[in-house]
Image (cartoon, helix red, strand yellow):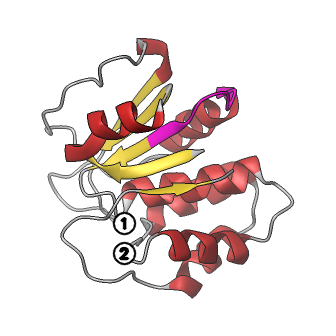
Amino acid sequence: MIVVGPLNKVQALVDEHGVSHVVTLLAPDTPHDAPVGIAPGQHLRLYFHDIVQPIDGHVPPRAADAEKMIAFFQDWDRAAPMLVHCWAGISRSTAAAFTALCLLRPQADEEELAFELRAASPSATPNRLIVSLADEVLGRNGRMVKAIEKIGRGADAFEGAPFVLRP
């Protein structure tokens, strides 16, 4: 099970779902504590801004970030849930969760997975750059990008409600 949510609910979600692995996707200067009960090797921290094109003074997601994220998902044994979070639980984390679905269900149609994401989270607006980088790493030939374009921007929200996906 993949649990997705915002930074301010991380510890509660770890505790509630018995999470064993955590993916943190935050801006480089965002202060945060490591979740209690998660071993260092089971916590991937990636630091970049939630942007889809270069902006002065901001760090964009990079191909190396997508590669690390995908390798972390591949190494997860799925014995216990994984939490994926960003600041608001709307863009970076939903892009990562969509990537995990595409990786863990390689035969599934990307559009079906994108609509599954939308059904689970009306506010999900996956970061296009993260999805594009992951699409390249996974060899999906642009299908992941087209799929998130198909679901469009999610409902306006200050913060996404936590949700669960089944890989």
Tell me which residue sits at (41%, 13%) in the image. Answer: 40
- Residue 129 in the image: state x and y as whole percent: 46, 63
Residue 80 falls within the magenta-colored stretch: yes
In the rendered view, does 105 fall on the left or right side of 45? right
| Helix, strand or loop for disc 2 | loop
The tally of labels here is 2
Residue 132 falls within the magenta-colored stretch: no
Image marks 2 and 1: residues in contact by CB distance under 8 Å: no
Amino acid at dot 1: Val
Tell me which residue sits at (52%, 76%) in the image. Answer: 118
Q: Quadrant of residue 16?
A: top left
Q: Nearer the viewer, residue 26 or 114?
A: 114
Specify the quadrant that holds the N terminus: top right
Q: What's the mark number on residue 52?
A: 1
- Label 2, label 1: how far apart the Cα atoms are: 18 Å
The residue where tag 2 is placed is 123
Amino acid at dot 2: Ser
| Helix, strand or loop for disc 1 | loop
* Disc 1 crowd, CA 10 A, few/some/many (<14, 14-19, 20+): some
Q: Nearer the viewer, residue 150 or 81?
A: 81
- Residue 69 in the image: state x and y as whole percent: 54, 38
Residues shaded magenta: 75-83
Tell me which residue sits at (54%, 61%) in the image. Answer: 131
Instruction: Name the mark nearer the viewer: 2 or 1.
Output: 2
Whichever of labels 2 and 1 marks the residue nearer the N terminus, that label is 1
Q: Quadrant of residue 12?
A: top left
- Residue 105 in the image: state x and y as whole percent: 78, 54
Tell me which residue sits at (30%, 45%) in the image. Answer: 48
Q: Nearer the viewer, residue 22 or 36?
A: 36
- Residue 93 in the image: above or below residue 1: below
